[in-house]
Image (cartoon, grey):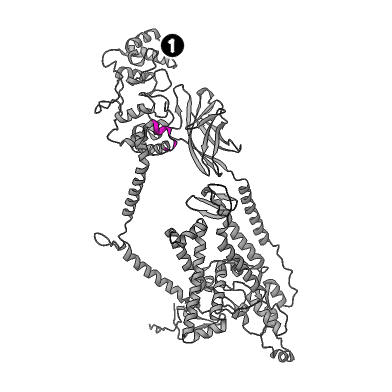
Amino acid sequence: MSEAKHGPDLDTPTGQTTTGHSWDGIKELNTPLPRWWLWTFYLTILWAVGYWIAYPAWPLIASHTTGVLGYSSRAELAQAMTALEARRDVQSAGLRQATVDQIAADPALTRMAIARGRAAFGDNCVGCHGQGGAGGIGYPNLTDDEWIWGGTLADIELTLLHGARWSQDNRTRTGDMLAFGKLGLMQRAQAESVVEYVRSIAGLDVERGADLARGRQLFVEHCVSCHGSEGKGNRTLGAPDLTDAIWLYGSSRTVLVETVLNGRAGIMPAWAGRLDPVTIKALTVYVHSLGGGQR
Amino acid sequence: MSMPAETDDDGPLYAPAPKVYPQSIAGRFRRIKTSLLIVCLGIYYILPFIRWNRGPNLPDQAVLIDFERKRLYFFFIELWPQEVYYLTGLLILAALTLFLMNAVAGRLWCGYLCPQTVWTDLFLKVERAIEGDRRERIKRDGLAWTLDTWARKITKHFLWLMIAWWTGGAWVLYFNDAPTLVRALTYFQAPVAAYAWIGILTFTTYSLAGHLREQVCLYMCPWPRIQAALTDADALNVAYRYDRGEPRMAVKRVALEHAAGRPAGDCIDCNQCVAVCPTGVDIRDGAQLGCIQCGLCIDACDQVMTKVGRATGLIGYDTEAAIAARACQAIPPKRRIVRVRTVLYAAIIALVGSAMLYQLATRQVLSVNVVHERTPLYTTLRDGSIRNAYTLRLANKQPEERFVAISLQDLSGADLTVAGAATTHGDPVVLVPADSTLEVRAFVSVHRRDLSAASQPITFIVTDVTAKTTARVRDNFFGP
């Protein structure tokens, strides 16, 4: 309940007037705000009106008021992006002129290439090769020291430009693991035999009583043309080294037999034409820097 | 049911702030205030011009906040953005010093040191010099404006604006090389930001010190409210000794009252304490929000007491406990500076202060951070060994470039290579540029037979080849 009284009501202890309202006997002292405070409030209202005029403010049915300054946050972003592109263009000049070897010899260019390569890798490569080039089954790990098609800067650049087994590019890397089973060149038992032999030269355990001599015989007949007489592989043909600890598809007997019978032919797309030369150079230097790069 | 008639005599909801015309006064506290004003403003205006040689390639300004290069310089101290926690320490120290001051002797900050007080004092000096003392100013403001009034008002506001402009001008010098910026400002070639900041500070100084003055303390500043909650009966405060002053009366009446056997106080109700008060409060109403405890009323009262031949000190620094005791004829308690409150504040100040000093004294000029590569967590190499990749960030906080050797500890049989590093005495060495950081990629490989667990601790040690100082950082080596 509030009652209004006539005349200012004086509060005896403080000597101040009250607002004249009483709520269950409790009254409020009337302590007026300083007038400048009110002016400050009016000023903020004025500021708001100025803001409506200057900046986009009011929603309309299909659009909104645009403000006399013509500001929009989207335009600001576009402007910032253009400025960034322009700045990158200046930085790219160095990358555009230099070869990958020249870039790798210059620490400043290398830093720039790695930064740009990392971004481009994230956009284009992680789908198959994984974050950081970790790879997966059938997709080479780019951080190790095994390179199917070669791990020098020039090798990596060539693979990036033309891909591997990419039929649309006539300079693509070629070389297939034949499907010895499907082509009728080997029976399953023979495949199992040659797999035991391959496991033996890779330092993996061999089934007891396995006929390694027969396996070796089959290896010499069918495999040495690509993988070499010692199984060390051949990068020109994309034939991997069979003696090391790295297995693209896995080293279990089942997988190896499957590989021999059905063949393997992983594809890497050609990026020339899809990515600009500077990005390809940056990617080359980045991939080379992941840990496995060779000289 | 009948409603009572609405009335509009509830009183105003807002009112003009009463104008305060502080009168000039001479005395001990006025001298202290003037000296502190000269010292504080002197430091503020001159500090940016003081030089401090840090060697080549580094700025030679003693106090400089360099946003462009992201460094803070304070004489022999140089701080990087990641050391911003020193600012936290400083803020804690500042708050606790304020509390301690308050527990010992009231609002020393408000009365003598606060920029609002110092600049208002300076503006008042200008006002007095141009428009005269309290009486003349009140008189002039009550009359119609003459040409002389116009001339004086314009001169005053012009001088205020000049001081305000200098305040902003000095401010921006803390963020740039002062002599260079002064030259650029003179030729109107300084960056827009510099002019904008000068403009902002000119506006705030002019309006806060020239126009709002005590309103800042009364309505804007949080400290009077906090202070009121922190003070206690044992804190010294500027106080009116009502035990001696009351009841107030004219000098002539004292004999009459005494003859009638009634008490007579020393306060002659001359109102001088109110006239000199820069916030316009009456100290005789007791401790209050508006009293900044600048001591000018002490000077005014002492002057009057001397004139009427009474002992000075009717207003003075005293504690609530002592005055209350004397008022009931008791012996005032001995003033206790050592109290739980003051000891605690001092202890925390000492603790935070010494922690900061220790940090500063043992500040690492070479430091290293590490991020373990997560994808892949580890790589199997052709010979079956396991390799982990790390990104190391080396920080060289010295004014010259340094060769830094990187080595490993804790992992036996580990082989370390660092991209782009030369090798001396078996350890990779990189060149970290002066006063900056360098990010390098480090590869650590271990033969599988040397790995005893899927995760093993590993420590990187970086050594400044010249100074032999080292820094280390721990991480883990992961394997299958």
Residue A106 covered by magenta stretch = yes
Displayed quadrant of residue B14: bottom left
Residue A188 visible in rendering: yes
Which residue corresponds to mark 1? A208
Q: Where residue A162 sits: x, y (%)?
A: 29, 28
Q: Where residue A40 sits: x, y (%)?
A: 43, 71
Residue A287 visible in rendering: no
| Pick the front one: B245 or A284 | A284
Displayed quadrant of residue B465: top right
The span shown in magenta is A101-108
| Pick the front one: B345 or B80 | B80
Q: Where residue B390 sits: x, y (%)?
A: 48, 34
| Pick the front one: A264 or B38 | B38
Quadrant of the rendering where the N terminus of chain B is positioned: bottom left
Q: Say few, some or many: other residues with alpha carbon within 10 Å of mark 1 (under 14 / 14 to 19 / 20 or more).
A: few
Vertical arrangement, residue B130 with respect to residue B430, above or below: below
